[in-house]
Amino acid sequence: QVQLQQWGAGLLKPSETLSLICTVYGGPFSGYSWRWIRQPPGKGLEWVGEINQIGRTNYNPSLKSRVTVSIDTSKMQFSLKVSSVTAADTAVYYCARGPGTTWFFDLWGRGTLVTVSS
Amino acid sequence: QSDLTQPASVSGSPGQSITISCTGTSSDVGSYNHVSWYQQHPGNAPKLMIYDVSNRPSGVSNRFSGSKSGNTASLTISGLQAEDEADYYCSSYTRSSTYVFGTGTKVTVL
């Protein structure tokens, strides 16, 4: 059974860099797009960004200047970095998979709560 | 980009059918048949229920169905069951090559 396992620091101070990693277990890595979505406490979902199977990235315009998504195919991992975080970046961050050239998220990680507080 | 508009809450009795609407614009919902729906129980990650407007992934009950007309997509849950009580979100691909989610709907089974 394919699973996405994610981890990273859960508590950051303002201006620090958020860094999360998601590893794919039990299934293929190639042929998919890899995505990040976040959900502030008690609020809705927000797409953060993605990287496709040929390494092309795409980001939410509201976050684009601070976000980097990258992949390490040899480790079957993809990562998210968000620089200069503020309290507004406090959220549960989910990694997710998109099959091939598709426009939905068919498999999700369990989520990582990242809190930004001084 | 603005969130897609969903009703904040929808309720129904067991066995009834309910429909959740998802209204966007001609730049997202109205442009493509790339609307998907997600179910989220408290404390859990979202789960894909419908993709490309009306397709069900393997393992999802056929009580869930999707449709679209113009800039509005809809999710219908028939034969409502207690386990269907959850938050539901729609999502659409946009002309800007980004994704936008709906505001979310809390479904309550009375």
Image: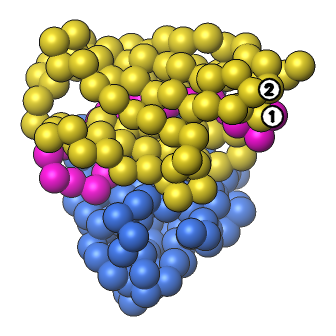
Chain colours: A yellow, B blue
Residue beneath label 2, please? A14
Q: Nearer the viewer, residue B6 or B12?
A: B6
Marks 2/1: CA distance? Answer: 7 Å
Q: Is residue B62 at least partly visible in the picture? A: no
User: Where is residue A23, by image quadrant?
Assistant: top left
- Describe residue B19's horizontal placement relative to residue A89 as left or right: left
Q: In which quadrant of the rendered image does the N terminus of chain B lie?
A: bottom right
Q: Is residue A10 above or below residue B21?
A: above
- Chain letter for mark 1: A
Q: Residues within 10 Å of mark 1 (few under 14, many from 20)?
A: some
Which amino acid, mark 1?
Answer: Ala
Q: Residues within 10 Å of mark 2 (few under 14, many from 20)?
A: some
Q: Residue at x 89, y 19 (%)?
A: A118
Q: Residue at x 38, y 83 (%)?
A: B30
Give residue A87's mark.
1
What is the magenta range? A87-107
Q: Nearer the viewer, residue B4 or B81?
A: B4
Question: Is there a contact, CB below 8 Å, between mark 2 and mark 1?
Answer: yes
- Measured as percent of width and height from the top left, residue A79 is found at 40, 24
Q: Residue at x 61, y 11 (%)?
A: A9
